[in-house]
Amino acid sequence: MTFVVDTDNHAPKKTMPPRLANVPPFPAVAVKVLSLLSDEDSSFSSLAACIATDPALSGRLINRASAADLASYCEVRSVLQAVSALGVDRTRELSLLIAMAGYTSSATKMEILKPCWHHTLACALIASELARQCGQRPAEVFTAALLHDIGRLGLLSAYTAEYAAMLAGADGQSIDLIQLEHANFGVDHLEAGAWLAREWGLPDSLVEVIIHHHEPPTGTLNEVTIVHVACRLAYLLGFSVNQLNTPAELAEIAAPLPEWMRSRLAAQLPSLKSAILKEIGLSENAEETPAGGAADAAEQVEEAPASVAQLDVRTEAPALPHSRAWLVGAMTAVAIVLLAIALFLRR
């Protein structure tokens, strides 16, 4: 049996390696979450119930919400509480991040393959920040960047030993991995990714990023351009698939961005790298699913707002340790009393 993918309307179809068809499908709950969050008429209850069908995802989302530096007065114990605390965009990011971490866990147990996952994660976090600064929706760009190398992960899953050997041979050399992939497997990770994305029913906008993110930007600051820049910045920060001797200079990488973004990007790189390292640590040390997480969510979905559009779409709030929550409450109460006294005296 042969498998083909039309990566471009004007290009001949590529034959996919048969072993790629045996790659496990992307987690169905993650695809469903993408579908629900792209539909503003979807109910909040259906989103919570969808996540609750996957106990592992539910538990880890609850844990991440509990660990987040949020100004919360109660412990997060259900998916409903987690989604409400995190907001739609952060829920989307974390759901896909957790799904991807689980999807890649078997392949990335091999030490030489871990850089592939680290690069993917770094690219997603950088792209999200670039999107936020230029006024685009960070969660959508985060999703595109997180899935941009899904073809490489697919090849890793189908040809784990062979791909590891290929990377080992290329380590430390400025070798085009796309050419090596063609030589070893007959397709590259761009073509494999586009085929897998369509097989899994991912949106066409994601397929565009997957197949075109290595191409020079056209001048339009869209998702493809942002992911392209984020991918190269990830390499510059040391999160590369293979250790290149001479990564591109920052000025060259940032050229497609507006001048005002380029001028401050260098100062932001240390904090971006710290955030990436923190996220890598969290994703690789995920805790076990708490008991009852999925069941609690299923019981509480009836209390949700009418639609996803009603949710707060803010990202995580500034850090606020739980041990100081009482202090915030006390200060708020004092402020209210002082305001009331001031108003009384002005009469």
Image (cartoon, rainbow, N blue to C red):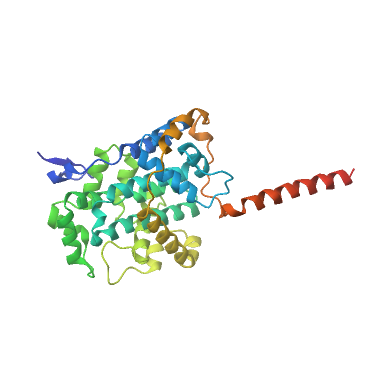
The total number of labels drawn is 0
Q: Nearer the viewer, residue 69 or 239?
A: 69
Question: Split into 4 quadrants, where in the image is the C terminus?
Answer: top right
Please give left or right for residue 128 compared with residue 235 in the image: right
Q: Residue at x 53, y 52 (%)?
A: 69
Please give left or right for residue 303 compared with residue 150 in the image: right
- Residue found at the very far front of the displayed protein: 291
Please give left or right for residue 149 compared with residue 283 in the image: left
Could you say where residue 171 lies in the image, as x and y percent from the top left?
22, 67
Q: Is residue 226 above or below residue 96?
A: below
Could you say where residue 257 lies in the image, as x and y percent from the top left?
43, 59
Could you say where residue 57 lies in the image, as x and y percent from the top left?
37, 42
Q: Is residue 244 above or below residue 212?
A: below
Q: Is residue 242 above or below residue 99?
A: below
Question: Split into 4 quadrants, where in the image is the N terminus?
Answer: top left
Q: Nearer the viewer, residue 184 or 11?
A: 184
Q: Residue at x 46, y 55 (%)?
A: 129
Q: Nearer the viewer, residue 174 or 157?
A: 157
- Residue found at the very far bottom of the displayed protein: 245
Could you say where residue 308 lies in the image, as x and y percent from the top left?
48, 34
Residue 332: in sight, yes or no?
yes
Residue 41: in sight, yes or no?
no
Q: Residue at x 17, y 61 (%)?
A: 166
